Amino acid sequence: MEKISFNKNRFEKDVGYVKPPGKVISQELDEKIKSINLEDFQTGAFKEIFPPICNIVFDLKDKIKKGEYSLVIGDDASGHIPALIIYKLIKEIYKKENKDIKILFLAGSRGIDNSLLAKKKEKISNLLNLKIDSSKKVLVVTDIVYTGETLLPLKNILDNLGTDFDLASVSVLREQALQELNGKFDNKIIYGTHGELQTILGNSSLSGVEKDPGNIFAKRKKMDEEELAYFRAGREDVELAVKKLLDFYYSL
């Protein structure tokens, strides 16, 4: 069966733009990340998000090694791909030690009114009460944090359940806002870069899902043939990203 091609410009705002990690942990690490070949990714999105995810993996490496996490919560919809990559990476690492990790995607709360938000929080709380291993931590993964307000309901739910967590974000909008954000999230933010993301924000063709206001789960997006081809290329890029990150992780 012939593989259907796709036009990246239809799905990505700025295909040729590859943003270097705005957060340089060390010169040596920065050079290591820059040496990783990104040209074999089919989508421009992965060329943009892969370097900052490397920074996140570096910051998480000791916690992953200790097996601290039992659940990844992905912030749908734009956070779907970063969460999937990090979950698959941890799952592969855990396999060697007979540990397990699960993933749960929850639709973000941006743009919904207070009455819907209250109902949504109750549903999420009931669900997480059944899913969470109280002896382990949860890793919440999102694409970008602006003010943190839309993630605070989830933080409050986890706090009320007595569950420790970390928040990993591919980017924070402004590095200068980190002090305020860490105040809101008890110094639990791990981020890869800062500034706007060009290629995954609002890219439902890459994630394959769309938010349904008030619903705790995103819904699958209906796609035409070209869109499906782009989506499938993205899923192949997920697997490639995990392989590259495994090599990166074991080189640290």
Image: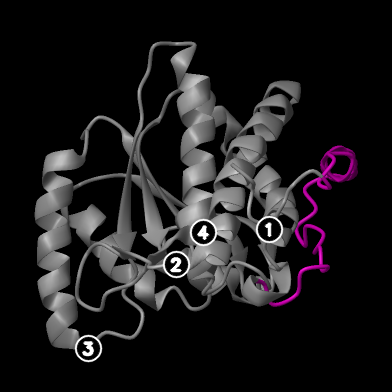
Residue in the picture at 25% in, 30% down: 135
Give coordinates of residue 137: x percent, y percent.
34, 38
Asked if the magenta segment contains residue 67, the reply would be no
Q: On screen, 155 above or below 83?
A: below
Residue designated by label 2: 223
| Residue at the front extreme, as displayed | 1
Whether residue 189 is visible here, answered yes or no, is no
What segment carries the magenta color?
12-39
Where disc 4 sits, the SS reads helix
Q: Would you place residue 102 above or below residue 233 in this image?
A: above
- Give the amino acid type for the residue marked by disc 1 in the picture: Ser
Q: For the residues marked 4 and 2, what is the alpha-carbon distance in whole angstroms?
A: 6 Å
- Please report the residue visible at 57 percent of the width from the left and 38 percent of the height from the top: 60
Q: Secondary structure at mark 3?
A: loop
Alpha carbon separation for disc pair 3 and 1: 40 Å
Marks 3, 2: nearer the viewer: 2
- Disc 3 or disc 1, which is closer to the eye? 1
Quadrant in which residue 218 is drawn:
bottom left
Cα distance, mark 3 to mark 4?
A: 32 Å
Residue that mark 4 sits on: 228
Question: Disc 1 designates what residue?
Answer: 5
Magenta-highlighted stretch: main secondary structure? loop
Query: Amino acid under label 3?
Result: Asp
**Do the numbered discs 4 and 2 sit on residues whose CB atoms are within 8 Å?**
yes
